[in-house]
Every structure is written in C-alpha cells, then in structure tokens.
C-alpha cells in the first residue's frame, strides 16, 4: 500500500470533500460501476490531484470510503453502542440503527455492500473492508460480555455466538430493507434478535427489563 501523503489543513479538507462526494457515487452505482473518471467529474478533481490524495488509486479511495461509512454508521449508534450492558441500552441501540438507515438514501449497509462486491474482484481489499464489519460486531460482543459479567445473562451464555447471531440478523434485515425499500424488515429482524437475546437473560434481569 503506498504511503499516505502528509497533508496541510487545506489538503485534508479537500481530501475529505473528495471522499464524501465519492461515497455518494459509490453508494448509488457500486464500486465496480464508479470509475476514477466518474469521481474526477463528480468532484471537479484533476487526475494528478486525485492521485496526490490517493497514491494507490481506486483501492486507496475505497479504503477511505470504508473508513468514512464506518464512522458514519458507528456515530449514528452512539452512545448506545458503547454502553450495551443493559437491556435499555440494547433497545436504544435498536432504535438508533432503525432511525439511521431510515434516513439514508440507500437502505442497505454500505460496508457490507462494498465487501460483497469486492470479494469477486479484489479479495484482499475485501478482507480489509470486512475488518470494519468485525469491529462493528465487536461492540456487540463487548456489550454482551459485560452483560454476562454483570449477571444479566445466564452463566452458560456465549457472548461471541450471541453477538454473531444479532449481527447476522441486522445485516439480513438491511439486505431485505434495501430490496423492499422499507424499514419494516430491519425492524422485524432487530426485534427478533433482541427477543433471542432476552431468552438468555437471567430471571431477575429479564423481569427488570420488562
């Protein structure tokens, strides 16, 4: 991977502007359907300028897009994402996820979409982008680990498996939400996931959450 250039304050702002504009193009057309020429035209950027900010070309730009989309998604879930140690926090997280994706022009998960598309053309880059998905899922697992330590989950509960099942429900709900252009599949998937999580709650914890 080419080294990231040292940028001035103005250069940092210009790079961020290019990434934000490119994110909208890729969201609408996909990675494969968006060329560097498309990005140059959409951002008013010359070829030399584009390669100054992204020395590795399109791969570098995709990495930057993944960083941007991840930060957008995670910020939309805060502060609940970092405090998933009560059932109230899980309810707040569920509502924050639904609110965020309901407000987006595209219902699907941009990170998941990039990963899926890149698997066939650039599996190495796909693996890098997928690390963002792993990080996101890690927040869920960390919250469930704290729930277990606090006695809110049964002693035989496995936070890793529960987090994976919840994240799979989320991603499946987003995929259907995109195809149906509706929040209903996402809401149903998350509600089912939280019901499954509560089935692992200790009796005292479950009563206090009802």
Image (cartoon, helix red, strand yellow):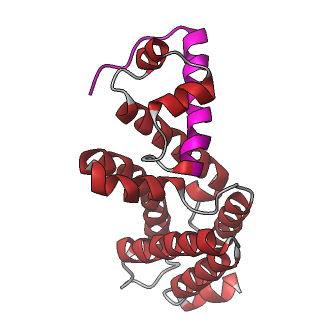
Nearer to me, 134 or 14: 14
Compared with 40, 111 (above or below) is: below
Nearer to me, 186 or 161: 186
Q: In x, y percent, where is residue 100?
A: 69, 58
Q: Is 202 part of what is drawn in magenta?
A: no
* Residue at (55, 81) in percent of width and height: 193
Nearer to me, 195 or 130: 130
Q: In x, y percent, where is residue 24?
A: 62, 42
Please give left or right for residue 8 compared with residue 31 in the image.
right
The total number of labels drawn is 0
Q: Quadrant of residue 173?
A: bottom right
Residue 27 in view (yes/no): yes
Q: Quadrant of the N terminus?
A: top left
Compared with 81, 8 (above or below) is: above
Q: Quadrant of the C terminus?
A: bottom right
* Residue at (36, 85) in percent of width and height: 156
Compared with 168, 136 (above or below) is: above
Q: Is 10 part of what is drawn in magenta?
A: yes
Residue 134 in view (yes/no): no
Q: In x, y percent, where is residue 209?
A: 68, 82
Q: In x, y percent, where is residue 72?
A: 61, 45
* Residue at (39, 56) in percent of width and height: 117
Q: Quadrant of residue 16?
A: top right
Q: Which residues are magenta?
A: 1-28
Instruction: Look at the magenta stretch and give its main secondary structure.
Output: helix
* Residue at (59, 18) in percent of width and height: 14
């Amino acid at each position: 991977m080419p080294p990231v250039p040292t940028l001035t304050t103005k250069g940092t702002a210009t790079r961020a502007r290019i990434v934000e504009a490119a994110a909208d193009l890729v969201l609408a057309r996909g990675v494969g359907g968006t060329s560097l020429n498309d990005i140059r035209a959409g951002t008013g950027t010359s070829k030399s300028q584009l390669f100054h900010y992204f020395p590795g070309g399109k791969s570098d730009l995709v990495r930057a897009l993944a960083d941007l989309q991840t930060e957008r998604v995670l910020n939309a879930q805060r502060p609940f994402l970092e405090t998933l140690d009560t059932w109230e926090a899980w309810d707040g997280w569920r509502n924050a996820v639904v609110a965020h994706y309901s407000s987006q022009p595209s219902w699907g998960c941009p990170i998941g979409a990039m990963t899926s598309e890149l698997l066939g053309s650039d599996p190495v880059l796909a693996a890098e982008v997928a690390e963002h998905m792993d990080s996101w899922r890690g927040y869920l697992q960390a919250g469930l680990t704290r729930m277990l330590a606090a006695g809110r989950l049964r002693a035989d509960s496995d936070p890793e498996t529960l987090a994976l099942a919840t994240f799979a429900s989320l991603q499946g709900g987003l995929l259907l939400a995109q195809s149906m252009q509706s929040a209903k599949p996402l809401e149903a998937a998350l509600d089912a996931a939280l019901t499954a999580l509560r089935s692992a709650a200790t009796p005292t914890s479950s009563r206090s959450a009802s």
